[in-house]
Amino acid sequence: MILEIVSPEAKLFSGEVTSVTLPGVDGSFQILNNHAPIVSILEKGVIKIAAANLTLTKDVANKFTKLDAQNYTLEIHSGTVEMKDNKVIVLVD
């Protein structure tokens, strides 16, 4: 599935991922390929991204924490997420 993470300042990430875990207001939840359409509000926490090959641009790479070869995290203050047709769009503050 395709994941896009966008902040008011810049597009932080766009690419193919295997899963994304998000800090929802009612608890953390994970989105996988072919997930049902969803729109949700996010609270302060950590987005966890799993991808076979994650490429970050130099100007935003410092915002992400690399856990291992296939897992990264991104701390956010709040945001919203929409999943539709195997495309996840996350708007973060």
Image (cartoon, grey):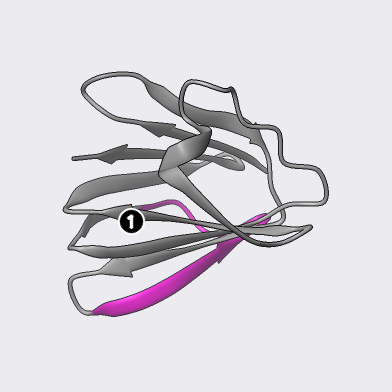
Specify the quadrant that holds the C terminus.
top left
Spot occupied by residue 37 in the image (x, y as percentages of width and height): 45, 51
The residues colored magenta run 27-38
- Secondary structure under tag 1 reads strand
Above-or-below relation of 14 to 36: above
Instruction: Locate the N terminus and report the quarter of the image it occupies.
Output: top right
Residue 73, image x, y percentages = 49, 58
**Marker count (numbered):** 1
Question: Residue at coordinates 42% horizontally, 73% vertically from top-left?
Answer: 29
> Can you say whether 89 is above or below 14 in the image?
below
| Quarter of the rendering containing residue 91 | top left
Tell me the residue at 26%/41% (across/down): 92
Residue 36 lies within the magenta run: yes
Q: Position of residue 80 (x, y in %)?
A: 24, 47
For label 1, the residue is 75
Identify residue type, mark 1.
Glu
Question: Along the horizontal axis of the image, is 30 left or right of 32?
Answer: left
Residue toward you, 90 or 65: 65
37 versus 31 height, above or below: above
In the picture, measured across the screen, residue 44 lies left or right of residue 38, that is: left
